């Protein structure tokens, strides 16, 4: 009603010359117009709003995007899809959803976190409700850890107060100062509220290269024994991964209370990528650039990647991380091939 009064004030000079019936009609129109303009369905079509409490994620759309854009990661896709959809459909979760994604560079950890963020908040990493922290950028100095702890707590508290469905992504966890991440432990625990704020509908995602060696060894052991990578199950890796990360001094989760108190819901392993997965990445990048897929270029780019172990050359040592740069070299050929196809 205050906004309606403000609008009426602007109309007063004209209203003075009108009859009482006309004045009453003008007030009604002003009130109706103000109500329409401030209604969430209209207002939120122009300004980003925090999702309403009853809004659920689109499981079908999320599954399709994961299947078409994330390659070679059957475990990560399955675990994250089930975890996120279960969390989203629960009207009163007991704690925030906390995921820890582990694997070598280029295996899709950042990509998956971006996809997930976009399904919670359509603007993704551009959303004011999605917060990305880089250890080397935001927490660079050893002697400032106590300051970082306070800043981190204040930032999370303020943003969850503004939007309970906030998403927090912590990248480079393997470079984070040990003990720093424990500052957010109260927010991840099973408390209904902390200082009057509920964190139960927020999502926290940790990204780390720590544990990548353990995952790679397990994948290679499966390959050596003649088993398909799709036979690897979460139970084959998660216990080993959580213990390995907890005891890894080069991990921001080293001896962390988040692990000790079982506050991380899932340790999600990202497997090393094989030749066929790298080729899938190359094809997807060509399509994203508007090029027709030329299998000769796909093979040429794949041949420029390096693989391990040294003799067998099964897995890409950089995943798909350098695909874009490698494809740049072949861009002229790709453009000519696309024009010829067109």
Image: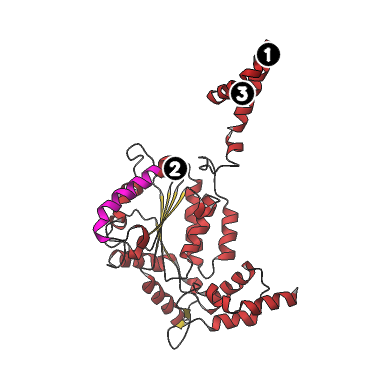
Say if the magenta span includes residue 1. Answer: no
Q: Residue furthest left?
A: 143
The residue beneath circle 3 is 31
| The N terminus: image quadrant | top right
Q: Secondary structure at mark 2?
A: loop
Neighbour class for label 1 at 10 Å: few (<14), some, many (≥20)? few
State yes or no: discs 1 and 2 in contact (Cβ < 8 Å): no
Q: Residue furthest bottom?
A: 311
Residue 81, how many percent across, how many down?
51, 57
Q: Quadrant of residue 3?
A: top right
Decide which of 175, 216 is in the foreground and name it: 175
Q: Nearer the viewer, mark 3 or mark 1?
A: 1
Residue shown at the point (32%, 38%) measured from the top left: 195
**In terms of secondary structure, what is the magenta stretch mainly?**
helix
Residue 213, how many percent across, how many down?
37, 74
Real-space Cα separation, disc 3 to disc 1, in angstroms: 20 Å
Say if the magenta span includes residue 150. Answer: yes
Decide which of 76, 4 is in the foreground and name it: 4
Real-space Cα separation, disc 2 to disc 3, in angstroms: 31 Å
Above or below 203: residue 278: below
Q: Which residues are magenta?
A: 141-158
Q: Secondary structure at mark 3?
A: helix
Q: Secondary structure at mark 1?
A: loop
The residue beneath circle 2 is 164
Residue 17, which numbered label?
A: 1
Residue shown at the point (51%, 67%) measured from the top left: 74
Q: Quadrant of residue 285?
A: bottom right
Real-space Cα separation, disc 1 to disc 2, in angstroms: 49 Å
Residue 310, how many percent across, how many down?
43, 87
């Amino acid at each position: 009603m205050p906004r309606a009064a403000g609008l009426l004030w602007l109309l007063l000079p004209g209203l003075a010359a009108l009859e009482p019936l006309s004045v009453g009609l003008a007030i009604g129109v002003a009130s109706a117009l103000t109500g329409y303009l401030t209604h969430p369905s209209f207002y939120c079509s122009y300004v980003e709003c925090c999702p309403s409490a009853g809004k659920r994620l689109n499981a079908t759309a999320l599954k399709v995007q994961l299947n078409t854009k994330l390659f070679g990661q059957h475990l990560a896709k399955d675990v994250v899809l089930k975890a996120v959809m279960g969390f989203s459909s629960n009207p009163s979760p007991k704690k925030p959803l906390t995921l820890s994604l582990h694997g070598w560079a280029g295996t899709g950890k950042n990509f998956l976190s971006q996809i997930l963020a976009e399904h919670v908040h359509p603007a993704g990493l551009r959303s004011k409700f999605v917060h990305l922290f880089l250890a080397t950028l935001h927490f660079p100095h050893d002697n400032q850890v106590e300051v970082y702890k306070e800043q981190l707590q204040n930032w999370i508290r303020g943003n969850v107060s503004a939007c309970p469905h906030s998403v927090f992504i912590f990248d480079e966890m393997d470079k984070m100062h040990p003990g720093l991440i424990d500052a957010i432990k109260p927010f991840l625990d099973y408390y209904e509220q902390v200082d009057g704020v509920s964190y139960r509908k927020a999502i926290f995602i940790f990204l780390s290269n720590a544990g990548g060696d353990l995952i790679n060894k397990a994948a290679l052991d499966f390959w050596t024994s003649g088993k398909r990578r799709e036979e690897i199950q979460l139970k084959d890796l998660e216990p080993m991964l959580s213990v390995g990360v907890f005891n890894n001094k080069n991990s921001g989760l080293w001896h962390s209370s988040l692990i000790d108190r079982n506050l991380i819901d899932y340790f999600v392993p990202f497997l090393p990528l094989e030749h066929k997965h790298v080729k899938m990445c190359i094809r997807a990048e060509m399509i994203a650039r508007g090029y027709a897929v030329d299998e000769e270029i796909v093979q040429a780019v794949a041949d420029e990647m390096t693989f391990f172990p040294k003799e067998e050359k099964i897995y890409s040592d950089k995943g798909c991380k350098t695909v874009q740069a490698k494809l740049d070299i072949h861009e002229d050929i790709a453009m000519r091939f696309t024009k010829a196809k067109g």
